[in-house]
Image: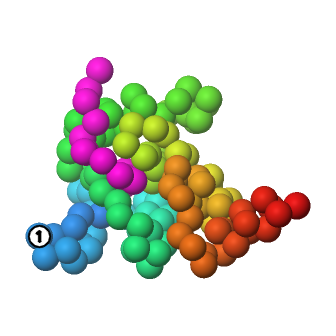
C-alpha cells in the first residue's frame, strides 16, 4: 500500500489543476483535449478550492494527472462503499490526512447544510454559520 502523498491537513485530489511556485492557480489539459466531463470536473475542483481558500482552510492539492502515485493513492483510499459501480472514482476526492471525507457531491451537500467543517473533521471557527448552528443545537 502506498503512503499518503502529504503530511497533514485537508487535501483533495484533482486532475487538471496545478499550483505554481508563486501560488498561482494554473490549469492544464491532458493531451490538449477538453471534453464536457472534464469541464465539469474542473468546475467542481475550482468550487472546492475556492471555498477552502475563501474560508482560509489550509489544504494541499494533489494532482492525479501529473503524478501516478497520487492517482494510485486516491483510488486505493476511496472506500468501497463510495466507489462508482464501474470505473474509478473521479476527482475531486477530499481527505483529511488519510481519512476519507467524500467526493464533490458530499462536499456540496455539507456546504448547503452549513456543515463543511464537520465534513472535513475540523472545528468550525467562532462566529461562522456552522458554529452558530451547532451552538443553537446544543442549547435545545
In the figure, is residue 21 to the left or right of 13?
left
Residue found at the very far left of the displayed protein: 21
Whole-percent x, y for residue 124 in the image: 56, 64
Whole-percent x, y for residue 77 in the image: 42, 32
Name the residue located 44 percent from the left edge and 46 percent from the top edge.
95
Q: Is residue 61 positioned above or below 99 on the image? A: below
Q: Mark 1 points at which residue?
A: 21
Q: Which of 11 and 57 is in front in this view?
A: 57
Residue found at the very far right of the displayed protein: 140
Whole-percent x, y for residue 39 in the image: 45, 66
Circle 1: is it few (<14), some (14-19), or many (20+) Cα within 10 Å? Answer: few
Q: Nearer the viewer, residue 121 or 18?
A: 121
- Residue 52 in view: yes
In the figure, is residue 103 to the left or right of 20?
right
Residue found at the very far top of the displayed protein: 1
Q: Predominant secondary structure in magenta?
A: loop
Name the residue located 73 percent from the left edge and 66 percent from the top edge.
135
Q: Nearer the viewer, residue 46 or 56?
A: 56
Q: Nearer the viewer, residue 66 or 33?
A: 66
Q: What stretch is highlighted in magenta?
A: 1-14
Q: Quadrant of residue 42?
A: bottom left
Q: Is residue 96 magenta-colored? A: no
Whole-percent x, y for residue 23 in the image: 20, 74
Amino acid at each position: 500500500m502506498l503512503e499518503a502523498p502529504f503530511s497533514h491537513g485537508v487535501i483533495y485530489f484533482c486532475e487538471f489543476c496545478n499550483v505554481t511556485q508563486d501560488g498561482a492557480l494554473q490549469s492544464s489539459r491532458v493531451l490538449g483535449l477538453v471534453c464536457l466531463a472534464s469541464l465539469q470536473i474542473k468546475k467542481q475542483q475550482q468550487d472546492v478550492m475556492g471555498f477552502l481558500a475563501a474560508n482560509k482552510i489550509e489544504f494541499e492539492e494533489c494532482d492525479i494527472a501529473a503524478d501516478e502515485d497520487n492517482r494510485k493513492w486516491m483510488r486505493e483510499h476511496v472506500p468501497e462503499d463510495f466507489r462508482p459501480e464501474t470505473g474509478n472514482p473521479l476527482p475531486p476526492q477530499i481527505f483529511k490526512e488519510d481519512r476519507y471525507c467524500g467526493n464533490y457531491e458530499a462536499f456540496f451537500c455539507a456546504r448547503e447544510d452549513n456543515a463543511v467543517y464537520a465534513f472535513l473533521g475540523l472545528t468550525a471557527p467562532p462566529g461562522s454559520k456552522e458554529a452558530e448552528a451547532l451552538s443553537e443545537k446544543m442549547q435545545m
